[in-house]
């Protein structure tokens, strides 16, 4: 009942936020005034996201260390990691390919009837942080405290894996450390519950702030592109649900129902991070074992961004179409392979999808200024991408648990966790 109420409150907050934002946009049409008002409104959302970021690092560290320590050996870590990466790579190929096929079929960039930015104009999006060399070096933290301070999830995962494996190797000597870390995870999850109580307010402020500055009119101007992109996301959701049905049968709808709150949080705040703590709790209720959730989910946030990856191919070809640049099938295949590599560096990069797209445009001699066509509506598109990432990572985590031979137990109705699923 509490979960249902929160979902209803979030939906109401979305509607009210759009209404209030529209009123503000019409009352104060001056862009400077609208931005000022939006800044004050979005303060609530900024505080909520800061609270989420405050707990991400200790939550990932504590749950992952406990999960790895309970596995007992490095073989289990390697096995589960290999299964997770197999899923991530497969899902990435499908997402990229779906975006590529749809954008070629629908041609959203053709006959755009919008003034195109000068090809030499700067988009203001830096691409220097996107090389594969830098990404590989970036995997290993220089300092765990620096990684936690900056919420570098992938670096936290690397350190936590070393820490958890060391605890498992020490056995009884590390028992106290593991027990303390497990208690820490419960404390952080309790704090998460307090923070989630602010979610409807954050959702309301987020929607109101966006509509105050952008107005509903921008969705009309870019209606075709936005509608076709969300059509693509809808198809991707159906594909993910279909794959889930293969593994879980009708129980996949139970999984979808459980992650509706994280889905709405990610959608309304355009932030996958906002959904992370709640998604972890809901997956355990499915149930997936804590060791699988705490290990696979943080990896998914770095390697399994299905919505973001589909957007990369969709938006890149859209810009090429807008400038009447024809890319051959070979060039598009090369682009897909390039995005498979460069997109793995998206985690932790501000405006990550735009950075990846900017780098891809430069590689294929497509005017980088084309980014200016989509920057104005990127917030609306990011909402769908973030929500899709939640669905993809939820399913990936549940499937890896299934591959590990877990037989779901009957979930409890109260408490932060449910009993560990039994291994088949």
Image (spheres, rainbow, N blue to C red):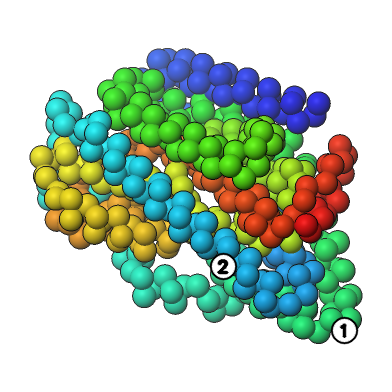
Q: Which numbered disc flags the more N-terminal residue, 1 or 2?
A: 2
Residue 165 vs residue 38: left or right? Answer: right
Rendering quarter of residue 227? top left
Residue 253 vs residue 186: left or right? Answer: left
The residue beneath circle 1 is 173
Q: How many marks?
A: 2
Rendering quarter of residue 224? top left
Looking at the picture, tell me which residue is in the foreground, 167 or 103: 103
Q: Quadrant of the C terminus?
A: bottom right
Label 2 Cα neighbours within 10 Å, binned few <14 / some 14-19 / many ≥20 = few
At mark 2, the secondary structure is helix
At mark 1, the secondary structure is helix
Residue 199 image offset from top left, x and y in percent: 66, 35
What residue do we see at 83% from left, 71% from top? 178
The residue beneath circle 2 is 82
Residue 243 vs residue 220: left or right? Answer: right
Q: Is residue 288 above or below residue 377?
A: below
Residue 36 image offset from top left, x and y in percent: 44, 32
Q: Is residue 168 above or below residue 333?
A: below
Query: Which dot marks residue 401?
Result: none
């Amino acid at each position: 009942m509490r979960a249902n109420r929160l979902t209803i409150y979030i939906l109401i907050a979305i509607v009210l936020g759009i209404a209030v934002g529209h009123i503000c946009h019409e009352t104060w049409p001056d862009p400077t005034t609208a931005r000022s008002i939006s800044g004050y409104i979005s303060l609530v959302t900024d505080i909520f996201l800061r609270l989420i970021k405050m707990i991400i690092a200790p939550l990932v560290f504590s749950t992952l260390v406990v999960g790895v320590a309970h596995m007992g050996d490095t073989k289990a870590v390697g096995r589960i990691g290999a299964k997770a990466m197999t899923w991530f790579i497969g899902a990435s190929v499908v997402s990229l390919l779906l975006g590529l096929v749809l954008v070629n079929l629908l041609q959203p960039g053709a006959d755009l009837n919008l003034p195109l930015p000068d090809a030499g104009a700067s988009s203001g999006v830096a691409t220097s942080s996107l090389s594969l060399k830098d990404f590989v070096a970036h995997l290993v933290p220089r300092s765990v405290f620096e990684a936690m301070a900056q919420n570098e999830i992938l670096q936290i995962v690397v350190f936590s894996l070393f820490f958890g494996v060391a605890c498992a190797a020490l056995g009884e000597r590390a028992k106290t450390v593991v027990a303390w870390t497990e208690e820490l995870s419960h404390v952080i999850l309790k704090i998460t519950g307090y923070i989630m109580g602010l979610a409807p307010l954050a959702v309301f402020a987020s929607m109101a702030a966006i509509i105050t500055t952008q107005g509903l009119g921008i969705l009309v101007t870019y209606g075709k592109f936005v509608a076709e992109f969300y059509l693509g996301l809808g198809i991707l959701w159906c594909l993910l649900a279909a794959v889930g049905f293969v593994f879980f049968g009708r129980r996949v709808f139970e999984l979808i129902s459980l992650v509706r709150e994280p889905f709405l949080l990610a959608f309304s705040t355009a932030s996958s991070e906002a959904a992370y703590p709640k998604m972890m709790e809901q997956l355990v209720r499915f149930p997936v074992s804590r060791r699988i959730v705490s290990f696979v989910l943080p990896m998914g946030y770095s390697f399994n961004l299905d919505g973001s990856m589909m957007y990369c191919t969709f938006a890149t070809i859209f810009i090429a179409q807008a400038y009447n640049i024809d890319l051959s099938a070979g060039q598009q295949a090369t682009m897909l392979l390039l995005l498979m590599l460069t997109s793995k560096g998206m985690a932790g990069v501000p405006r990550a999808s735009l950075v990846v797209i900017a780098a891809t445009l430069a590689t294929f001699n497509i005017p980088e200024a084309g980014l200016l066509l989509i920057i104005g509506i990127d917030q609306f598109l990011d909402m769908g991408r973030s929500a899709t990432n939640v669905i993809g990572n939820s399913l990936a985590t549940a499937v890896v648990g299934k591959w590990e031979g877990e037989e779901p137990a009957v979930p409890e109705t109260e408490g932060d966790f449910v009993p560990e699923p039994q291994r088949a």
